[in-house]
Image (cartoon, rainbow, N blue to C red):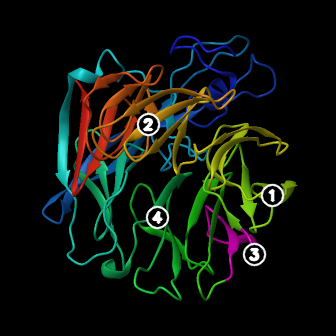
Amino acid sequence: MQAGGENEQTVEQMLKLTNGGDGLPFRRSGSAAFYQVVLYGVYTPFREPLGGSMRSYPRTSALVLIVALGFSAPATAAAPGWEHAGYDAENSFYNPGESAINAATVNGLTPRWSVTLRQDEGTCGGPSSPLVAGGLVIAPDDKGITSYRATTGRPAWRFNWDDPDDSSIPSMAVATGVLILGNGDCHSASDPDGMLTALNLTTGKVRWQVQPPTPVHSFVVDKGVVVVSGKSESDEATTVTYGAADGRERWRKPGFTSSSASSAGRILLTNGRSTSAVALPGGTVLWTKPQTWYAESATRTRFLVTTGAALSLVNAASGTLLWTAPGQQSELLATDGRRAYRAVDRKVSALDLRNGRVVWTRTLPSTANQPVRAGGLVYTGGPVLSAASGAVVNRGWHGQQVVTAGRIYLADGNRLTTWAPR
């Protein structure tokens, strides 16, 4: 598809909206004229004390969406969220459904609520980017995890690490009503431990907990499974997969480490000599190439991989190398299916995903954070840029940001703040 205006969507972007993930509240069944009816819950909160504040619980009443058969009706968007660290299992850091905050409205945002995150002197964990799911904002803090009501900032529930002083910042993802956390200890260099913890998203109660055979260095949740890998001085590199619903081990591949990005249920495993793509949930090998690739980000058909000296685009289905851009490697990548956005030190660049050529580069006043793409904009942890041109649209906000449902959720130090249009 030829690049055009910011409202134009690629096939990949439309698939992302309609594949039953983050967009339409119905799924196709057979022909385009027939759809499944979806039942949604309407929440009415009631409260009880929670550590000096008010705790809210949802009551669920039924709201039935009636879809006529025999013709295609306009769709009502599903409740938006940000359920993975990188928005989706592709680690794209791109929210295609955001439209309320854009170049015309971003300069008129005001803070809606702000809270101080829990602190614990001496902890090795701490704050990171929040998730947004089920009407909640889920934020790591020094003691564990706190869930806040997205509209008000009121605490909903809290979860504490057994030992906050020896618990690292977790990787997080939401799958089918379960919040999955992957982290480990901090003080053992030779024999560090990993831990996976699954919490009920609504209540914060522990659903299951399991200790992988290695520390958790990579983490991805897709197709109903959790894939983690790691290694240490005392642990052989191993990739292990667990069921997201029950924590039961599904399969493992000793000698391999995995990437933290999935392309429509395909992930990359490498043993330092070659790289294989495997299909989730079962782990079937799809292809193997004599390259050492790590996928930093993906679309539903392609992997953005790094080799330490270059950034490359790889066909996810076949492993075909589509292009290589020497010197453009970065761990901080985002992609909207049209461009890749990379941050290195104070520079943020956009690369054309068709050929890897640099479209624009912007030098920031300070070091850039992970780029986030939403509403025609690129958020950098500093100035907000036009995705199309790199022009500065707003002086921006410091900290780690997610943008969804017409709000920016910003974690900066020990404060979590929400911004929205007036």
Q: Looking at the image, is mark 4 or mark 1 nearer the viewer?
A: 1
Q: Where does the image place residue 357, in percent across and percent down from the top left?
A: 62, 29
Q: Mark 3 = which residue?
A: 255
- Looking at marks 2 and 3 on the same chain, the residue that comes earlier in the sequence is marked by 3
Camera-nearest residue between 59 and 191 = 191
Q: Looking at the image, is mark 4 or mark 2 nearer the viewer?
A: 2
322 left or right of 366 in image: right
- Label of residue 348 in the image: 2
What is the quadrant of residue 307 in the picture? Answer: bottom right
Q: What is the C-alpha distance between the residues marked 2 and 3?
A: 35 Å
Q: Mark 4 = which residue?
A: 199
Amino acid type assigned to the residue bearing label 3 in the image: Gly
283 left or right of 113 in image: right
Q: What is the C-alpha distance between the residues marked 1 and 2?
A: 30 Å
- Looking at marks 4 and 1 on the same chain, the residue that comes earlier in the sequence is marked by 4
Could you tell me which secondary element the residue under label 3 belongs to?
A: loop
Q: What is the C-alpha distance between the residues marked 1 and 3?
A: 12 Å
- Looking at marks 1 and 3 on the same chain, the residue that comes earlier in the sequence is marked by 3
